[in-house]
Image: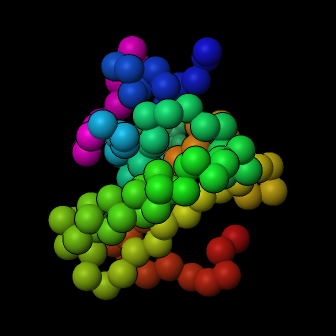
């Protein structure tokens, strides 16, 4: 399977890993949109949120909790945002489910 995030997780492609455990690998985004821009990748290849099933409920919650932990470690006391882009309208470009953690600057709402 030719998935760049699977290859980063496997160590076949370089990635700046900031957190890893048996379920999740977190890396710095290659094109950061905020002072902190981390991608949380489940080790399991799931193309996106639309393909997640009931068996992934715990994993999806876990991604959010690890994001909160990393935000705390980064000292993002002013707040942060976690984002799942799903499909073309949301601009999803890598089809391995990933949770963005963005912080370190004020963010507008609604998002563009
Ligand atoms: P999304 O639009 O949600 O699919 O975002 C994909 C993100 O992945 C985007 O912010 C750029 C990032 N990205 C793409 N390729 C690579 C890569 O090879 N390494 C890293 N670290 N990030 C990547």
Q: Is residue 34 magenta?
A: no
Placement of 14 over or under 86, stated as above or below: above
Q: Could you tell me residue 57's position as x and y percent?
A: 55, 56
Region of the chain picked out in magenta, as a range: 12-21
| The N terminus - image quarter | top right
Q: Could you tell me residue 60's position as x and y percent?
A: 51, 56
Q: Could you tell me residue 49's position as x and y percent?
A: 66, 51
Q: Residue furthest right?
A: 89
Residue at left offset 56%, top offset 32%: 45
Placement of 105 over or under 21, stated as above or below: below
Q: Nearer the viewer, residue 90 or 47?
A: 47
Placement of 16 over or under 84, stated as above or below: above
Residue at left offset 49%, top offset 25%: 6
Colour basis: rainbow
Q: Nearer the viewer, residue 13 or 60?
A: 60
Secondary structure, magenta segment, majority class: loop
Quadrant in which residue 20 is drawn? top left
Q: Is residue 13 magenta?
A: yes
Q: Could you tell me residue 82's position as x and y percent?
A: 48, 66
Residue at left offset 41%, top offset 26%: 8
Quadrant in which residue 69 is drawn? bottom left
Placement of 71 over or under 28, stated as above or below: below
Residue 67 visible in rendering: no
10 lies left or right of 19: right
Q: Nearer the viewer, residue 31 or 49?
A: 49
Q: Nearer the viewer, residue 24 or 28?
A: 24
| The C terminus - image quarter | bottom right
Residue 81 visible in rendering: yes
Residue at left offset 47%, top offset 56%: 58
């Amino acid at each position: 399977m030719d998935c760049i995030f699977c290859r980063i997780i496997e160590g076949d492609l370089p990635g700046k890993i900031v957190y890893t455990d048996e379920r999740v690998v977190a890396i710095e985004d290659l094109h950061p949109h905020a002072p902190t821009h981390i991608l949380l990748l489940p080790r399991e290849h799931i193309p996106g949120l639309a393909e997640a099933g009931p068996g992934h409920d715990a994993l999806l919650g876990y991604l959010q909790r690890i994001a909160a932990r990393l935000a705390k470690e980064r000292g993002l006391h002013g707040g942060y945002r976690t984002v799942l882009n799903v499909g073309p309208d949301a601009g999803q470009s890598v089809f391995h489910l990933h949770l963005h953690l963005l912080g370190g600057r004020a963010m507008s709402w609604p998002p563009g």
